[in-house]
Image: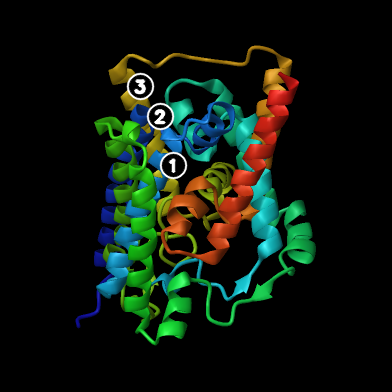
Amino acid sequence: MELMSLDELQGLKVQIWTLGFVLSFWTGVWIHRGHFCTMGAISDWVVMRDATRLRQWALALAVAILGFGAMVAAGWISPLNTIYANHQLNWLSGLSGGALFGVGMVLASGCSSKSLVRLGAGNLKSLVVLLAMAVAGLATMRGLTAVWRVHYIDPVAVHLQEGPFVGQWLSSISGLALPHALGVSAAVVAVMLFIWVLCDRRFNTLSNWVTGAGLGLLVVAFWWLSGVWGFVAEHPETLEPVFLTTHSGRMEALSFTAPVGYWLDALLYFSDGSKRLTLGMVTVLGVLCGSCASALLQGTFRWESFTDRADFVRHLVGGSLMGLGGVLAMGCTFGQGLTGLSTLSVGSLLSVMGIFLGAWIALLWQLRRA
């Protein structure tokens, strides 16, 4: 195979950024038009016992799991090349970070992706939420709170002998080859989710299916973009395999908490020469533009601000908790939710459990106050 030149490499990066922007643009449109919201889904269930949006979320997850598993079984990608391939299960970080993120997204009226969509539609509250999230996230990645995280929270972990993915456990028990075991486990879990989604006939509307299945397919498309299109077997300078434009150097799909922080970091310190545009950063921009375009075409764009001081404080605290919790849990409702769970990662499952638990506690607290 002929070695790729640096000019060809740069051209491939531009292609990835362009495709990433297009995909994330449609993600913003899909979330805005379909009212897709993890916090809203949990709130609907806790307050009204309405599981419609929760089934939307489950449908998106089922499609993402099935698509990821199919690509693994076909040999296109491997979950071992993702950030979730860690044999050390940082259970305290995942659960506590997820819980803090869950509380934060209730106080902030939505998670990081929903805040981007709301900002695109003119909601200035979300601008404060995203700024607070970015500052808290950067501090937890490499600031004062990062020191506490590294010394006191991250070391609390257990070693997963068989690996962090359900497919690895199935491979160990059944003797199946790892790609086949990962594909089988993905198919089984996806079918179970599909069955639950279909249990309620009221869910079977075109809007619900387009929103849920569409977002699931977008997660799969991002896995393909970073893991297949963006994979270079030999970098022309290092001669090592590389996944282009990802911040971690591994395969990545949709995630928002850390990329929002990277935008703030680039804005403040771009001239130091070490900053680079990543796929995650392009994703943030695309979702923002997509939701803005959707709101303008729909005629629902309007400027909205805080009603009083208590409203401001609540959103400021919520954004800070999302930044802190999102870094501790290594992802948000997309990063550890739809994206992480699509790999059937045990760590992602713990983080999502923490997010749902934190949101449930915060919603009950709000109901009691009301």
Seen in the image, is 296 located left or right of residue 324? left
Could you say whether the residue bearing mark 1 is in a helix, strand or loop? helix
- Of labels 3 and 1, earlier in sequence is 1
Q: What mark, if any, has residue 35 been given in the picture? A: 2
Residue 235 versus residue 360 in the image, above or below:
below
Could you say whether the residue bearing mark 3 is in a helix, strand or loop? helix
Q: Nearer the viewer, mark 3 or mark 2?
A: 2
- Of labels 3 and 2, earlier in sequence is 2
- Of labels 2 and 1, earlier in sequence is 2
| Label 3 crowd (10 A; few <14 / some 14-19 / many >=20) | many
At x 68%, y 19%, the residue is 311
Marks 2 and 1: CB-CB under 8 Å? Answer: no
Q: Amino acid at mark 1?
A: Val
**Which residue position holds label 1?**
284
Q: Amino acid at mark 3?
A: Ala
Separation of residues labelled 2 and 1 (CA atoms): 18 Å
Residue 99 versus residue 13 in the image, above or below:
above
Q: Which quarter shows the C terminus?
A: top right
Residue sitting nearer the eye, 290 or 30: 30
Q: Amino acid at mark 2?
A: His
Seen in the image, is 127 located left or right of residue 219? right
Q: What mark, if any, has residue 134 been given in the picture? A: none
Separation of residues labelled 3 and 2 (CA atoms): 12 Å
Residue sitting nearer the eye, 142 or 181: 181
Q: Nearer the viewer, mark 2 or mark 1?
A: 2
Q: Which quarter shows the N terminus?
A: bottom left
